[in-house]
Image (tube, rainbow, N blue to C red):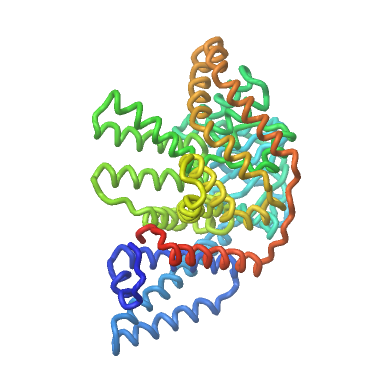
Amino acid sequence: MITTDKENYFEHISNSANITLLLFSCFLCGVAWKSFFENFYVLFLLLMCVACLFFLLAFFFSKKFFFIGCVVWSAFIGAWYYDIRLSTLELKAPTIGAHESIKGIVVSHPKTTPTYQQFIIELHSGARVSVIADGFHGIAYHDMVLLRGQLNHITSENNYLLKDEAVTSMAFPAINARVPGNSSFLGALYKISDIFSKKFLTILPSDEAALAAGILIGQDNAFFSKSLQNAMRRSATTHLVALSGYNIVVVITLISGLLRFVGKRRGVFWGTISIIILFVLLTGADSSVVRAACMGIFMLIAQYYSRLYSFWHSALATACIMIVYNPFLLVFDIGFVLSFLSLYGVAVIAPRLVALSDVVFHSWESARHLVAQTIGAQLMTLPVLVISCGGVSFMGVISNIMILPMMPFTMAFSFVTGVSALAWSSLGIMTSLFLHPILWIIEKIIYLCGVFPLRTVPFSTGGLCFYYGVLFFIIAFCIKRKKLPSYDV
């Protein structure tokens, strides 16, 4: 619904769905504000006083003031909730600075490279510690380990560890004891993903095996050569192996299509949701995958019960569910931030670019949509990528336009090849004959576009705000000027 008449503004936002949308947005703003200004306690007093003022005005004058008071109060609750969760983590944290012996259980899927392992352990007190250890110990999920080393509090350089709810870290401790954990459902899934990665290495060249494993089950399970890592970073193709909404869409399309041949509508619905959940757990439940899976499940539920699907309500509900579960994702998880920014670029900017391209081109609709989606995602994520990666790739649009159409086939053939190799190595080698040419082409495109170095663009906090302010102003101007349709919010 598009509202252009100012007199109908409060009528437009008065329905319960849009009120919920606005309250959720303010809750997220409160969490974000407190994430940036951890010691800014004046914010609490200010928000509380403003909210109470509007509640009093609503009591004596108009109910519209009550609505504004609820909006302000939602921001206060968001900031308060973040502060409570952070204080709880710090209270549980062990002693900092000394060489301590700690015993805990591995609660994450260890990220394994040829030289080290990185994982999270949970102590008896409930505190979590991020650990980097030598790679030859073979630490696995749910193992109990006894470590001795120096505990350090997280700093501005590694505050991204907060996304795992860890406020302390330990680098290369002495592992005095390791007791293999009991079998568990998650542990079994992680072992399957590890086996997949190793099987690809036995039937494909190393770089192609890393690509197949990364595209299918995520980059934490793949061994990338240094040259391939650099080429992917310079060609803006690292997202191909950081599972996201595109992978979930492919999974939903393939699974639901297959299940329709063997089951009824009810079975297709529950079977697709079950496989999505299994896929999320198998790939390590990264924030980008969880976001896409939640929105995909909301869409399936709406279709199954014949209800209208609201993109914006689905996206915001997903964000709030994830932030309530872990409020530190909003600022300290780069995957979470990039996932929602690129989603906005694809959903809002891309349709405007397609509409503008109609003026010049009247054919090649699929190609125009692909180009517009790629540019939209790049525009929304540009400042964050510059800050986190140290530069921007101007070849990213070209590389993604060439590679993305091949992704559904790559995922499908990678899955078939992996399963075949698990059943019988010779069968895996035969099925890899279909996968190898696709991976070879993708690899060559990455290396070709990765020849060009990243361009550094200075971005301060003020520059960040200015960039997004100008971008949103242009979007709003195009909607009003061109009378382009927008999503119903």
The residue depicted at 61 percent of the width and 17 percent of the height is 203
Camera-side residue of 372 and 131: 372
Q: Residue furthest bottom?
A: 60
Nearest to the observer: residue 482 or residue 165: 482
Count of picture labels: 0
Q: Is residue 313 visible?
A: yes
The residue at 32%/32% (across/down) is 271
Can residue 175 be seen by looking at this rendering?
no
Q: Give the farthest residue toward the top.
A: 426
Q: Please report the residue visible at 53 percent of the width from the left and 28 percent of the height from the top.
A: 410
- Seen in the picture, residue 32 relative to 321 is either above or below; the reply is below
Residue visible at 35% across and 26% down in the picture: 258
Q: Residue 402: image x %, image y %? A: 59, 36
Tell me if 403 is positioned left or right of 485 in this view. right
Quadrant occupied by the N terminus: bottom left
Quadrant of residue 19 within the rendered picture: bottom left
- Quarter holding the C terminus is bottom left
Depth check, front residue: 386 or 123: 386
Q: Position of residue 393 (x, y in %)?
A: 68, 47
Q: In the rendering, at what x and y percent does residue 127 appear?
A: 56, 52
- As drawn, is 1 to the left or to the right of 426? left
User: Does residue 325 lie above or below 203 as drawn?
Assistant: below
Relative to 166, is 84 above or below? below
Whole-percent x, y for residue 213 in the image:
58, 29
Q: Is residue 332 left or right of residue 316?
A: right
